[in-house]
Image (spheres, rainbow, N blue to C red):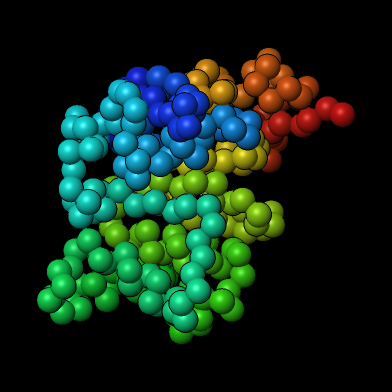
Amino acid sequence: MMLGAERVKWTSGGRLIVDEVTLHVETGQTLGLIGPNGSGKSSLIRLLAGLRAPSGGAVMLDGKAITRFGRRELARRVSVVEQHPSTEASVTVLDVVRLGRTPYRSAFSAWSEDDEQIVEEALAHVGLEQHRDRHWHTLSGGERQRVQLARALAQSPSILILDEPTNHLDIQHQIEILRLVARLSVTTVVAIHDLNLAARFCDAIAVLEEGKLVACGSPLEILTQELIARVFKVEAHVAKSEYHGRLHIQFLM
């Protein structure tokens, strides 16, 4: 086990948002977090990433509470891609991706050949080598997500955490982003709305409902007609696709 939550709670304004969630992510696994709006997915993502401290319980990284890691040390291990990356600064694609090397550099260290190679590899991985000099405000939503993914990869993390990276993207860019993520040789946690995309690209799925973890396991185990009806309040037909062998969910009207 690389990353885990042990009876983690988080409250805001007196309201319990994450309710004693226990969850383990195996090394190299892609874990999808699914659940209705308001189920606590984004809050749990931020807890797992160390962006906020739990009100109770603990998030563990390699057997050590994540709150005991220094910011620089944690940034070398865990990289986060949030939902709506934006900036008013006049920055280029290359500027943004280079930010991923910040945890490895001091205020007085020179930019190294190793730094440059890692940044170039990150750009190549997301297919943006030819767009390095483009300015942020000229990019589409899908391109911005790819830039943020490249920035995250430039951190050389062992864990990548993504909060609904396909939100507001068209279907082409949704599939493109998740294919990129699936090819990475890192442990990944991704909050995702689309159940079919979760079934296709995730090794395991955790289901949240009103802040509680109600199910966790492989897509085949978890994405049943009964669970979808109970948690998402819709009827569905679930079967293996003849095209890619993963589950395919058809919602019944």
Q: Provide residue 46's location: percent of width, then percent of height.
A: 40, 41
Lateral position of residue 111 relative to residue 167, left or right: left
Lateral position of residue 223 relative to residue 109, left or right: right
Which of the 4 image quarters holds residue 170? bottom right
Residue sitting at the far left: 108
Which of the 4 image quarters holds residue 220? top right
Lateral position of residue 161 relative to residue 210, left or right: left
| Image quadrant in which the C terminus is located | top right
Residue sitting at the far front: 13
Q: Provide residue 110's location: percent of width, then percent of height.
A: 15, 79
Q: Is residue 203 visible?
A: no
In this view, 148 is above or below 66: below
Q: Is residue 242 visible?
A: yes
In this view, 39 is above or below 97: above
Question: How many marks on residues?
Answer: 0
Which residue does the image show at 65% across and 21% down from the upper left? 231
Q: Nearer the viewer, residue 70 or 33?
A: 70
Which of the 4 image quarters holds residue 139? bottom right
Q: Provide residue 71's location: percent of width, then percent of height.
A: 22, 51
Q: Nearer the viewer, residue 97 or 172?
A: 97
Which residue does the image show at 17% across and 38% down from the upper left? 68
Residue sitting at the far bottom: 133
| Image quadrant in which the N terminus is located | top left
Q: Provide residue 148's location: percent of width, then percent of height.
A: 45, 62
Which residue does the image show at 40% across and 29% down from the upper left? 10
Which residue does the image show at 37% across and 48% down from the upper left? 160
In this view, 107 is above or below 47: below
